[in-house]
Image: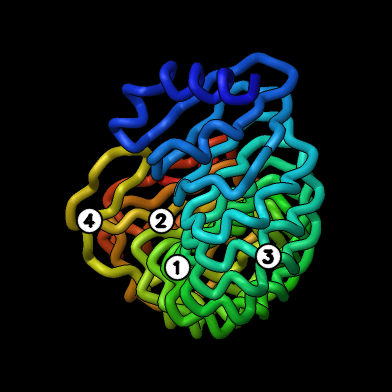
Amino acid sequence: MEEDYETKMIQKYQNDVQKQELKIISNNQLLDLSFVDKLSVNSLTVFSCYNIVFKELPLKVTSLQLNKCKLESITGLEQMIWLKSLNLFENLLSSIDPVKFLVNLNELNLGNNFIADLSPLQPLKHLTILEAFSNNISSLAPLQKLNLLTNINMYSNSISDISPLRNLKNLKFLYLGFNQISDVNILQFLPLTELDLNENQIVNIEPFKFLKLHFLTVSRNYITDLSHLDVFADQTLQMHQQQVPSQRQILIANRTKTIYQNEDRKIKMKSFSLKNESTKRIVKTFIDQMKEKEIHTYKMFVNAIHEETPWQ
């Protein structure tokens, strides 16, 4: 019976096998993937399954996607040591212990699960991209020696301390919105080009003056001084899937009482946006300063703008 099952499965997916990429859609309670071990596929994607039985592993694939499979456990994956890409987005995982054996992983997506402990990632020295947004993560300590990381997305977790990232000298893209971060001093030591710290508890952004950012979001923080924002390279910036050639665009949206306190006139931005600001008064001198700084576009949303502000 087992041989008949495997034969039928191989015949069913013969066309995909020729492409070296296999995609399976299953609404069954149990999905037996044992037949895949006899296929010459590099990439396996499984959609819409309720559970998976990994039988006679290891599977001979280098890329595995198990999105939205309602997995509560990934026991059985530990033998797949040649995996380079693993996507476990939107499952029911609270533990990822088997991942520690996948030492060849380059890309890992753990987004939208119930994971609190990242310690199984410590042996993954080849990891370059980590997506772990929408989890219960509070500590980044397990990442501190993963020196090849270039992209980290920890959006919507419970992170307050980012000091473990200090020595990640290859980190270019960092997304830490919707956390509890207040101290960003260590960021000045990183080669970041994109930084998202939306919805945190940041007051001081002086460390940003050492960065060569192309994109920055610090929406809904407590920033009181914007004089350190003259840190952006004149390069193409992609915002909301639109190319803005040779312009600098910064999204600033802070719950502050004072927008600008400095006489520094070095800021030269061509697009400037303030959103959801609880500011009670934007004084006339600030608007005049913006004009002198070649800020060509001003946008205010849901703000209490003082009636004397010369807004167009």
The quadrant in which the C terminus is found is top left
Tell me: 286 left or right of 46: left
Counting residues from the N terminus, which is met first, the one under dot 2 or under dot 4? 4
Q: Which residue is mark 1?
A: 150
Image x and y of residue 301, in percent = 52, 37
- Determine the CA span between mark 2 and mark 4: 13 Å
Q: Residue at x 62, y 75 (%)?
A: 184
Q: Residue at x 68, y 65 (%)?
A: 100
Q: Is residue 276 visible?
A: yes
- Comparing labels 2 and 4, the label whose residue is closer to the camera: 4
CA neighbours of label 1 inside 10 A, class few (<14), some (14 to 19), many (20+): some
- Comparing labels 3 and 4, the label whose residue is closer to the camera: 3
Badge 1 amino acid: Thr
Question: For the residue labelled by badge 1, is the local secondary structure a helix, a strand or a loop?
Answer: loop
Image position of 182 with respect to 1: above or below: below
- Determine the CA span between mark 3 and mark 4: 38 Å
- Comparing labels 1 and 4, the label whose residue is closer to the camera: 1
Give 3 or 95, whichever is nearer the viewer. 3
- Determine the CA span between mark 3 and mark 1: 19 Å
Give 84 or 149, whichever is nearer the viewer. 84
Counting residues from the N terminus, which is met first, the one under dot 2 or under dot 1? 1
CA neighbours of label 4 inside 10 A, class few (<14), some (14 to 19), many (20+): some
- Determine the CA span between mark 2 and mark 3: 39 Å
Q: Which residue is mark 3?
A: 100
Badge 3 amino acid: Lys
- Determine the CA span between mark 2 and mark 1: 22 Å
